Image (cartoon, rainbow, N blue to C red):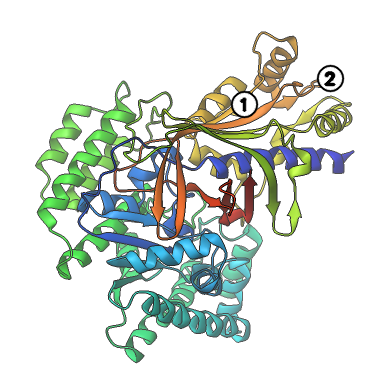
């Protein structure tokens, strides 16, 4: 029975996770605007991609450094990083011939500026605590093997970028040190082991991080020494470390809830560094960018914190009077700390772009994750992707009737003895961080006890659950049980007309040989791009089909 409960909890979390990943998108309209001054393309891993880091996620296009730099400088900006990537995977994406890789390579060829943030997963991915223990013990055999491999593929990636675009300016970030005695990247047992190795000195955890990050960042410096002028270094490591040493509370505020990714404030600091480097290289005008950054923050302040305890007028005045990016940031973030943003039901500023002159409708053909096809779990005929002439789109996924029945049988078994406690599924996620930390960061204010609130917050990223009738006794029973004990009650069944739908706006853009449909569920700059897109393929007979790849989860969806 315990195993069945874990499976059901895992399945529910998986459905939520897939929904979130597939929903991470942005918005559009007619009349394409090519008024940008330069194109900047971002390559790397999750530190750049900003899926984890921005909070709430619906503000990704206003909080992540890739978007702030693009918007402040009137650049066309394309975020092409993939969470979890190592240098090997980056190099593979820069050389592979699958559709998403070829689209990425095309973007690289078109860039004036290419920003790279990579290497973290080469050494800090996996069991960071064990790696730190080995470093303190002086056992560098495994560490050196990982560093050698990272160095090899970092160099190959830079060479491939230059092969694709020899004229672009390349910027490479160093990586910050995320280790601290309070960090959830290590288990308590690993912290205890490290402290014991240092005769009770807890600062050894930070010191171990300094050692590991110094070795990792040496890859960036060593390559540049061997290949002068290959790229410009943006020293994120020193800036984060300096903030940490000057003021501990301000230093740890740079980290997201998982202690791995940069927080909204961490992204702002990286923005300052990138902006200074762009100005130094003659690629940006500081005063122009500052004026646009002020507008971005004031708009965000009014959008998220009107009707809260934040003094909008006072903060707006401080931002308007600021003389630097740093002063704008210092005026904005301290004023909103501890205040839950109001981010649902907000009006959308549609991004300009071409739309179809005739409605296009595609039916699900495959949904693969690696070598496995999960389309059999869905009703292919009713699972429809629609792109309308008014610029709106919907991606509707309907479970197969038999699979829905099997799911209800599993629910019956799992809830047979007092219900299914969902708190079990919110335990440890990555490292020693609870899954609830991630979900409450993606959706600030989230309370799992209130089912209707969960649905409302999902709508902020364009995800809707159809078939939920709040007057139905079955749903009322679920709501009451969730509110009381966060438990799926005995006897609850999934509605027979249940479906998941992602809704928003889209625009179509020809990118080299590819016709891409960009799908959006929130605000995005007129020169930015959403997370989710579909490539439209045309056959010899004129028929078309679409392919959507969610690279972070290795999911590829095709519809015809």
Q: Nearer the viewer, residue 57 or 144?
A: 57
x then y, percent, for residue 304: 33, 30
Whether residue 123 is visible? no
Residue located at (14% from left, 68% from top): 282
Q: Does residue 281 appear to the left or right of 448 in the view shown?
A: left
Q: Is residue 359 left or right of residue 158?
A: right
- Please report the residue visible at 62 percent of the width from the left and 82 percent of the height from the top: 142
- What residue did someone put label 2 on? 491
Residue occupying the point 40% across, 56% down: 511
Dot 2 or dot 1: first in sequence order is 1
Image quarter hosting the C terminus? top right
User: In the rendered view, would you say 100 is above or below 143?
Assistant: above
Q: Is residue 490 above or below residue 45?
A: above
In the picture, measured across the screen, residue 369 lies left or right of residue 311, that is right
Crowding near the residue tagged with mark 2, few <14, some 14–19, many ≥20 C-alpha atoms within 10 Å: some
Q: Is residue 491 left or right of residue 423?
A: right
Q: Callout 1: helix, strand or loop?
A: strand
Residue 349 location (% of width, % of height)? 32, 32
Tell me where residue 244 sits by quadrant.
bottom left
**Nearer to me, 2 or 293:** 293
Q: Is residue 327 visible?
A: yes
Q: Which label sits on residue 543?
A: none
Residue 318 is drawn in which quadrant? top left
Q: Could you say where residue 40 lies in the image, as x and y percent from the top left?
A: 31, 61
Compared to residue 558, the image places residue 214 above or below, namely: below
Which residue is the site of mark 1?
465
């Amino acid at each position: 029975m315990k195993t069945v409960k874990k499976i059901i909890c895992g399945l529910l979390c998986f459905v939520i996770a897939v929904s979130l990943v597939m929903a991470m998108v942005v918005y559009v309209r007619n009349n394409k605007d090519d008024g940008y001054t330069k194109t900047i393309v971002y390559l790397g891993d999750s530190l750049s991609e900003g899926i984890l880091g921005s909070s709430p996620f619906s503000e990704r296009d206003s909080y992540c450094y890739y978007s702030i730099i693009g918007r402040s400088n009137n650049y066309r900006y394309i975020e092409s990083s993939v969470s979890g990537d190592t240098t090997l995977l980056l190099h593979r994406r820069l050389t592979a011939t699958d559709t998403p890789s070829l689209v990425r390579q095309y973007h690289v060829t078109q860039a004036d500026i290419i920003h790279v943030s990579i290497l973290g997963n080469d050494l800090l991915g996996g069991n960071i605590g064990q790696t730190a223990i080995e470093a303190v013990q002086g056992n560098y055999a495994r560490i050196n093997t990982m560093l050698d491999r990272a160095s090899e593929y970092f160099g190959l990636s830079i060479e491939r970028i230059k092969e694709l675009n020899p004229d672009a300016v390349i910027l490479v970030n160093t990586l910050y040190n995320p280790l601290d005695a309070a960090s959830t990247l290590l288990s308590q047992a690993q912290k205890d082991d490290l402290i014991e190795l240092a005769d009770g000195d807890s600062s050894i955890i930070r010191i171990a991080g300094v050692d590991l990050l110094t070795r990792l960042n040496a890859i960036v410096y060593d390559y540049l020494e061997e290949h002068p002028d290959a790229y410009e270094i943006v020293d994120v490591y020193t800036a984060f470390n300096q903030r940490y040493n000057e003021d501990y509370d301000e230093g740890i505020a740079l980290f997201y809830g998982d202690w791995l990714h940069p927080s909204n404030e961490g992204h702002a600091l990286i923005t300052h560094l990138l902006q200074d480097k762009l100005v130094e290289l003659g690629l940006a005008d500081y005063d122009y960018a500052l004026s646009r950054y002020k507008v971005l923050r004031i708009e965000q302040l009014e959008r998220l914190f009107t009707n809260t305890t934040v003094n909008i007028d006072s903060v707006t005045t401080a931002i308007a009077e600021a003389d630097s990016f740093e002063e704008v940031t210092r005026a904005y973030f301290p004023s909103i700390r501890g205040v839950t943003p109001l981010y649902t039901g907000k009006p959308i500023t549609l991004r300009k772009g071409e739309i179809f002159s005739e409605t296009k409708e595609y039916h699900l053909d495959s949904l693969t994750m690696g070598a496995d096809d999960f389309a059999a779990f869905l009703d292919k005929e009713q699972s429809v992707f629609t792109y309308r002439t008014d610029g709106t789109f919907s991606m509707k996924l309907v479970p197969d009737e038999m699979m829905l029945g099997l799911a209800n049988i599993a629910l019956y078994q799992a809830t047979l003895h007092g219900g299914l406690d969902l708190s079990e599924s919110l335990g440890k996620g990555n490292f020693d961080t609870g899954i609830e930390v991630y979900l409450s960061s993606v959706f600030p204010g989230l309370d799992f006890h209130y089912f209707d609130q969960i649905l409302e917050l999902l709508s902020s990223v364009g995800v809707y659950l159809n078939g939920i009738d709040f007057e139905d006794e079955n749903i009322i029973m679920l709501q009451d049980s969730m509110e009381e004990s966060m438990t799926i009650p005995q006897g609850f069944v999934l509605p027979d007309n249940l479906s998941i739908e992602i809704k928003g706006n889209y625009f179509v853009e020809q990118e080299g040989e590819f016709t891409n449909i960009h799908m959006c569920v929130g605000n995005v700059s007129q020169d930015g791009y959403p997370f989710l897109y579909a490539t439209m393929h045309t056959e010899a007979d004129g028929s078309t089909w679409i392919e959507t790849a969610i690279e972070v989860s290795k999911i590829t969806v095709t519809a015809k």
